[in-house]
Amino acid sequence: MQLLSHYRDSLPPGSPLRAAYAPPAAAGAPYLPAAGVALLGVVGLASGVILVGLAAIVAGIGWGVVIRKRADAADAARAEWDSSLICLACTGTFRR
């Protein structure tokens, strides 16, 4: 048994198994657009467009929450991959 990450790193660069045992992709977390929408909502509130401003603030916060959940799920998948083991005899992967 060996850590999957160590096994993958020991493979030669041209090996097709490097792609098969690759870690899950990291989720990009573009919070700036969500913050921009919420900021536009604040500007809308300040300028007197109350309903549109509140809707934009709620949309920006909701978008930020969705981004955060995706990032957390990707981090959990990467942590699981990082602690996975591979059997060198049967090439089966196992969780710790």
Image: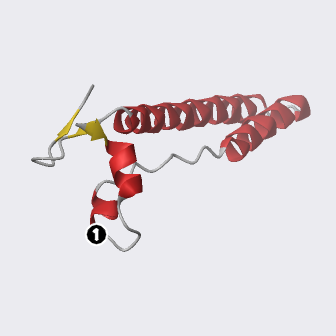
Q: Residue furthest right?
A: 47
Q: Which quadrant would the C terminus be assigned to in this image? A: top left
Against 89, is 67 above or below? above
Say which element carries label 1: loop
- Could you tell whether 7 is left or right of 38 in the image? left
- Could you tell whether 33 is left or right of 68 in the image? right
Against 25, is 77 above or below? above
Q: Residue furthest left?
A: 90
User: Looking at numbered disc 1 in the image, what kind of residue is underneath it?
Assistant: Pro
Occupied quadrant, residue 16: bottom left
Can you give x and y, in whole percent of width and height, for residue 93 in the image? 20, 41
Can you give x and y, in whole percent of width and height, for residue 87 in the image? 17, 41
Against 64, is 5 above or below? below
Against 8, is 17 above or below? below
- Rendering colour mode: secondary structure
Q: Residue furthest top?
A: 96
Q: From the image, tell me which residue sits under label 1.
A: 16
Residue drawn at x 75%, y 33% is 53
